[in-house]
Amino acid sequence: MNERLDATAVVADILRVFRERGDRHYGEQVTERQHALQCALFARERGESPALVAACLLHDYGHLVHDLGEDIAARGVDARHEEAGANRLSRWFPPEVVEPVRLHVAAKRYLCWKEPDYLAGLSAASRQSLQLQGGPMTPEEALEWEQNPHLEAALRLRRYDDQGKVTDLATPDMESYRPLLEALVR
């Protein structure tokens, strides 16, 4: 199979997962698919790199590939979706896409430590998951995390993640991101 066919097959599979499981809710008033599309739209509108737009689109992919249900946070379970998604995506995409996905939960924990108003602005579902994810970082964790080369991209993704919860926002569909994703498959 040639490289282009491989990229086509990879992206077709990712889009299939969003078609089949993207209507799940995760404690917010939007579905997983709506949330992904909103995050990607906001990133694209702000002129972010193709890799960061893709990371925004795919950041919660881990929620779609586990079979733990939609209400796991209410049951006190942290599925570590950021790791599940990043590990799966790392087979196909470069670190510029994968690492912000892997780090978007750590970015939330960091911002809760760094910016006092950030925690107060989180949605109820995000505050609930924060507790399962370890709560705000400690100063020691934050100082170590600040050395991560993907810190800035993860923080930008996190901001789009927080914004991408608008009920009934019109967005381009998943299919419109096919060329962008295919171009990034390695």
Image (cartoon, rainbow, N blue to C red):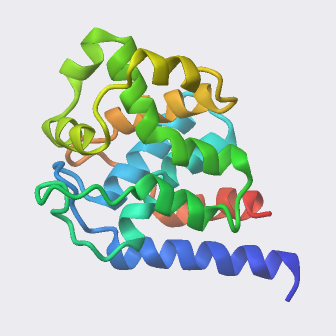
Q: Position of residue 30 (x, y in %)?
A: 22, 52
Q: Where is residue 98 in the image (x, y as percent from the top left)?
A: 62, 51
Q: Is residue 49 above or below residue 168?
A: above
| Quadrant in which residue 87 is drawn | bottom right
- Could you tell whether 5 is left or right of 42 in the image? right
Q: Which residue is drawn at 54% across and 17% down?
A: 143
| Quadrant in which residue 7 is drawn | bottom right
Q: Which residue is drawn at 36% across and 60% down?
A: 33
Q: Is residue 146 above or below residue 116?
A: below
Q: Looking at the image, can residue 121 be seen?
A: yes
Q: Which residue is drawn at 66% across and 61% down?
A: 90
Quadrant the N terminus occupies: bottom right
Q: Position of residue 136 (x, y in %)?
A: 32, 26
Quadrant the C terminus occupies: bottom right
Q: As drawn, which residue projects farthest toward the front?
A: 140
Q: Residue at x 45, y 61 (%)?
A: 61
Q: Is residue 156 above or below residue 67?
A: above
Q: Looking at the image, can residue 47 be seen?
A: no
Residues 2 and 125: in front is 125
- Could you tell whether 73 is left or right of 170 in the image? left
Q: Where is residue 96 in the image (x, y as percent from the top left)?
A: 70, 44
Q: Is residue 155 above or below residue 113?
A: below
